Image (spheres, rainbow, N blue to C red):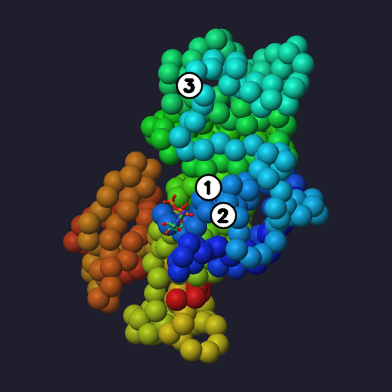
Amino acid sequence: MSLELAHVRKSFGDYKALDDINLSVGAHDFVCLLGPSGCGKTTLLRIIAGLLQADAGTLSFDGQDLGRMPPRLRNFGIVFQSYSLFPNMTVRENIGYGLRIRKTPADRVAARVDELLRLIRIPDMAERFPWQLSGGQQQRVALARALAVSPRLILLDEPLSALDARVRNEMRQEIRDVQRRLRIPTIMVTHDQEEALMLADTIVCMNNGSIEQVGSPQVLYDRPATSFVADFIGLSNLLPMDWLREFSPQTLSEAPPPAGDGSRWLLCVRPENIRLESRADGAATVGAVTFLGNLCRARLHWGKRELVVEQTAAAASVEGERIQPVIDARQSCWVAA
Ligand code: ATP
């Protein structure tokens, strides 16, 4: 493990922004802090960076206590949402800044900057100023500047949120490639679940100042622990036990619920795990159908509930059709309500 957080807490006045955060980041991990606006992601990142002091708890890196270590001694590279390049410096000067203030000899700074310009694929823009670059190019320079000093951890605070969809997609891939190549542990804040699923080895799903679940993208998608995670990552149908007993008893016998109070559990059924059989005596009616290219998404009216189903475009149902839904119980899981 490289970074370890134990029992970290932070309040702003009476407001608890972080409550008992425990987290380990592996030596080569790409970790995404994912959650809705205001859940505490940026606060946590700022505490790790040393820009904000926790009220309680411990932080260590490779066994070294980060406690009151000032940010510049931590040797972490940080990229913020706004490009935050120095406007009066060229790309070359921006990238070399951290090395120059560490009194690195000029020829070594130049060689390192050239290497990074190649890495981020803008070798011919070294003499431009930030205002002569696109948003995506500026964010590449910000990344190169963070990497220049060979940081032992990279912290990214929504670095792609100001970019348009196409550039954002390209940049995601590049950030992932660069991280894979350099193998520096990385923590990125995002509220975009697609981004987290695409980039992360480990997703830390946060809600209301607490961690709901930590796991690989696949685990969080296939086996969410709580209804919040099931709802926040991908689409899901969250079905109460009473409803299943009445409308799909077969599912209950195939996926027996955990013991104890049934009202504490919901069955999470992903839209692709409901098969539709076209039958005049079917128990459900197809509502709005949306064409998504390779898939069709349909709303089902079934037992006074609306469920969402996705099927290949070729198998798509038509609005108003009567169908019998069949839940794939083996692919579904119980989550805490
Ligand atoms: P977003 O995605 O919108 O940036 P976030 O998950 O990063 O959200 P934080 O910025 O960590 O959220 O904020 C968590 C909560 O703490 C919010 O309710 C915010 O208003 C509050 N907060 C953050 N910084 C301060 C501060 N300096 N003073 C008072 N409250 C703050």
Residue assigned mark 1? 189
Mark 3 or mark 2, which has the lower sequence index?
Answer: 2
> Can you say whether 303 is above or below 42 in the image?
below
Amino acid of disc 2: Leu
Mark positioned earlier in the residue sequence (1 or 3): 3
- Between disc 3 and disc 2, the foreground one is 3
Residue 146 falls in which quadrant of the image? top right
- Image vertical order of residue 317 relative to residue 104, above or below: below
- Which residue is denoted by mark 2 in the rendering? 44
Q: On screen, 83 above or below 278?
A: above
Task: Return the disc, 2 or 1, that comes first in the chain's sequence.
Answer: 2
Q: Position of residue 191 (x, y in %)?
A: 45, 50
Q: Nearer the viewer, residue 189 or 333?
A: 189
Q: Do labels 2 and 1 touch, CB within 8 Å?
A: no
Q: CB at mark 2 closer than 8 A to ligand 1?
A: yes
Residue position marked by numbered label 3 in the rendering: 87
Q: Is residue 160 left or right of residue 298?
A: right
Indicate the amino acid at tag 3: Pro
Q: Residue at x 64, y 40 (%)?
A: 154
